């Protein structure tokens, strides 16, 4: 039953809002992973980021796409926990585990073992509108455990103006999505993080190029 509700939620609510009210210009959508295990890493400064990325995969792949989100925020009460895990389909991430011997990446690793496509926001939280922060190194630990998994960089521009952190009113604004070539585990944390950072910087630079020059 929850699978049906999830499908209807994205089909009847999320997709119309994202595709009609917001509007997307997506460059190189063919570079998104067609199947898992795979990871999409993206910048994060709007409530809409997750919905936009999930919309890009279409309804056919929706069942395999799961955003990774902070457990302390999205599981803070029973109703939100149900909606977040069953309808949005998040993989909860324990950001702080004090005094407990538990693997914070266990849920992520299990999902990858099951062939899922995960969405990660390595900045950790929504930052200031349209300002990209440095990525945290947690993605390198995931890549080290799953060296066969491709990490696809995605840069989004415009959503920080549509629904930035701290705002509850949606402002229609066009969004550009830039998708890069997948990056694999390089064998070392520093070189992997540098490869991701370089890819994101290159994608971010594309926002200054007029759309008609990239078509």
Image (tube, rainbow, N blue to C red):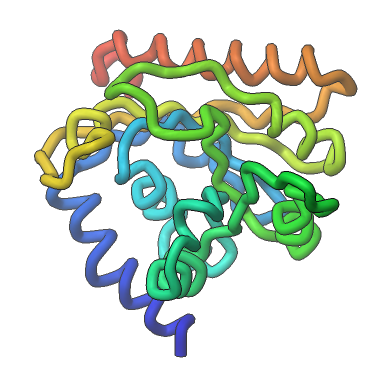
User: Residue 136: percent from the left, percent from the top?
Assistant: 62, 25
Q: Quadrant of residue 64?
A: bottom right
Residue at far right of view:
187
Q: Is residue 157 left or right of residue 65?
A: left
User: Residue 175: percent from the left, percent from the top?
Assistant: 25, 33
Q: Quadrant of residue 152?
A: top right
Using the image as rendered, state which of residue 73 and residue 60 is in the foreground. 73
Q: Is residue 188 above or below residue 141?
A: above
For the image, the number of numbered tags is 0
User: Residue 195: percent from the left, percent from the top?
Assistant: 68, 15
Residue at far front of view:
99
Q: Is residue 186 above or below residue 50?
A: above
Quadrant containing the C terminus in the rendered view: top left
Using the image as rendered, state which of residue 58 and residue 193 is in the foreground. 193
Using the image as rendered, state which of residue 80 and residue 96 is in the foreground. 96
Using the image as rendered, state which of residue 41 and residue 27 is in the foreground. 41
User: Residue 74: percent from the left, percent from the top?
Assistant: 46, 57
Residue 87 seen in render: no
């Amino acid at each position: 039953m929850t699978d049906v509700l999830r499908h209807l939620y994205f089909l009847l609510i999320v997709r119309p809002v994202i595709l009609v009210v917001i509007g997307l210009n997506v460059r190189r959508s063919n570079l998104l992973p067609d199947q898992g295990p795979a990871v999409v890493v993206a910048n994060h400064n709007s409530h809409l980021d997750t919905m936009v990325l999930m919309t890009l995969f279409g309804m056919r792949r929706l069942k395999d796409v799961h955003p990774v989100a902070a457990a302390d925020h999205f599981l803070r009460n029973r109703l939100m926990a149900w909606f977040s895990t069953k309808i949005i389909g998040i993989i909860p991430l324990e950001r702080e585990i004090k005094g407990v011997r538990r693997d914070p990446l266990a849920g992520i690793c299990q999902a990858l073992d099951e062939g899922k496509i995960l969405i990660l926001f390595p900045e950790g939280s929504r930052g200031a509108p349209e300002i990209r922060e440095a990525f945290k190194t947690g993605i390198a630990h995931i890549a080290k455990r799953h060296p066969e998994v491709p990490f696809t960089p995605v840069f989004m521009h415009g959503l920080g103006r549509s629904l930035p952190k701290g705002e509850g009113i949606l402002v229609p604004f066009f969004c550009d999505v830039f998708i890069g070539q997948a990056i694999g585990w390089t064998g070392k944390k520093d070189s992997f993080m540098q490869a991701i950072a370089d890819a994101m910087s290159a994608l971010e630079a594309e926002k200054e190029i007029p759309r008609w020059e990239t078509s």
